[in-house]
Image (cartoon, rainbow, N blue to C red):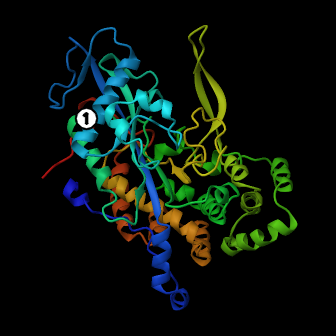
Amino acid sequence: MATVDDLIGMDLLAGKPVLTAEQEKYMSAQSLDQYYLRTPVTYGVELQFLIPVLVEGQPDPHPNDGRQVLTVKPGTSHEDISAQVVEAVMLVMRAEARVPVWTYPGPQYLKFNAVPTMDEESQAIVSRPPYSQWTVEAARDLLPFRDPCNKFYTWVGVKVKSNKRNSAVPGHFEPIAKVIVALRQYFRMRLPPTTSLMVHIGENRWDNMVYENCPLWLRVFCTLWWFIESHVFLLIHPSRRRNAKCLPLREHSRLGIMEPEERAETLAKGLQDGPFASLYQQMHYILPISMITDRDEKDIECIWRARDAKTLTQMMLVRKLQYVKMDFTGRILPHGTEGRGSLGFQGSCEGADPTSRRKNNDGESGTIEFRCLEGTLDPEFILNWVAVLIRLFDTARRGNTSEIMAIIARTRGSYGGLSLLRDLGLEEQARYFDEKLGEYLKMPEGVIPERWNNLFVDAYPTP
């Protein structure tokens, strides 16, 4: 395992142009550098984990773990316990990782009446630009249902969201590595199957109106993802394909399960004639028509005929079950709804996820949320995963039609996740994930196992 010193100053590989000889002849490196300098790819990560809490007088089930456990008085409400955990996490992040952190989730612009409710250090960073602060919040949705470990600990789900990181700045990953190392040093943290590693990818500068109208790169990206999604899932644990937090879009989205009659109606309501003519041409620049099915062609046409980003992104919502507690009986019953699958578009346009109860990022960040990866607190794993996602995003926005068509064509034959990484020019990530896949082969396919003796993530090795 790499030490924290190995991670300091590491940069992502994405963003480096991959050009054909003909393109290199007509496009100077200087002009490309200027473009990427003006509009680099940015990203943010969301760490998810559980922290244990003991009631005073309760014996420590893991006495050999040197990291202390927060204790509370008997009868303390879960809300108060969660607040204490969040405060402790923020204290470590401020003191050890030295990052600006608060508990305010959004929306993008802070309302002044919220400022007096914050602690002094949070008030001190109010004036910073949006998304330049880290956020910590308690999250009940991370708690496993009928968790057998509940009889030993009280659990608090925690989400730590990084600020916006600029991939063009040297050492951009360093604060994330420092936060993870500090948290692992001070806290016992658990990663059950309910946790994920969420990554938001976007551009440093973006135009809200352009995004709402559905930019060309978004159609290109959704088309590319439609064909490579199953190969991306081959890079991670097999259980994630069935995890309700990240169901594959091709299998579970509105578009993926659309009946022929509904698809015909969707196409009829979409862009027609003149407005669609140029998009039709652009669509065929990246589609190897002779190698895809009629169903695939119609699905992709729905993407390209979408009148705006809201129409397109709502086609990517997946059907899922949500368990709701009935107040009058206390029973927990399943309720059919829709939500985000392997991707979330709520940051890229308003109304992309109308089922979301939280509107703190409703088309305000200009990002795509990648939800596939299992929960992890391994900085090296996260760094390599982010490199893959940035390259995918960057490939779509650069729109190298021959490169994209070639990748889509290869997905129609014998292809895999490692082949995809090599086609994207990510040799280093291909080697890393090749080793990672060997670790997955030693695990059961159904779920990432939790064992009592190694329930918590180890403290990170330091020099």
Give the secondary structure at mark 1. helix
Which class describes the residues within 10 Å of circle 1: few (<14), some (14-19), or many (20+)? few
Q: Is residue 172 above or below residue 94?
A: below
Quick one: which residue is furthest to the left in this view? 463
Residue at 47 percent across and 68 percent down: it is 419
Residue at 81 percent across and 71 percent down: it is 277
Q: Is residue 32 above or below residue 371?
A: below
Quadrant position of residue 411:
bottom right
| Residue 437 appears left or right of 403 | left
Of 456 and 9, nearer the camera is 9
Q: What is the x, y in percent for residue 196?
A: 44, 42
Q: What is the x, y in percent for residue 112?
A: 49, 34
Residue 149 visible, this angle:
no
Quadrant position of residue 287:
bottom right
Inspect the image, locate mark 1, and give the three-letter code of the amino acid beneath it. Asn
Q: Is residue 79 above or below residue 378?
A: above
Q: What is the x, y in percent for residue 41?
A: 47, 63
What is the count of numbered marks?
1
Residue 266 visible, this angle:
yes
Residue at 72 percent across and 58 percent down: it is 303
For the N terminus, give its image quadrant: bottom left
| Residue 91 appears left or right of 19 | left
| Residue 37 appears left or right of 324 | left
Q: Is residue 183 above or below residue 25?
A: above
Of 23 and 409, nearer the camera is 23
Q: Which residue is mark 1?
A: 454
Residue at 73 percent across and 62 percent down: it is 304
Q: What is the x, y in percent for residue 149?
A: 34, 22
Of 308 and 39, nearer the camera is 39
Quick one: which residue is furthest to the bottom in this view? 25
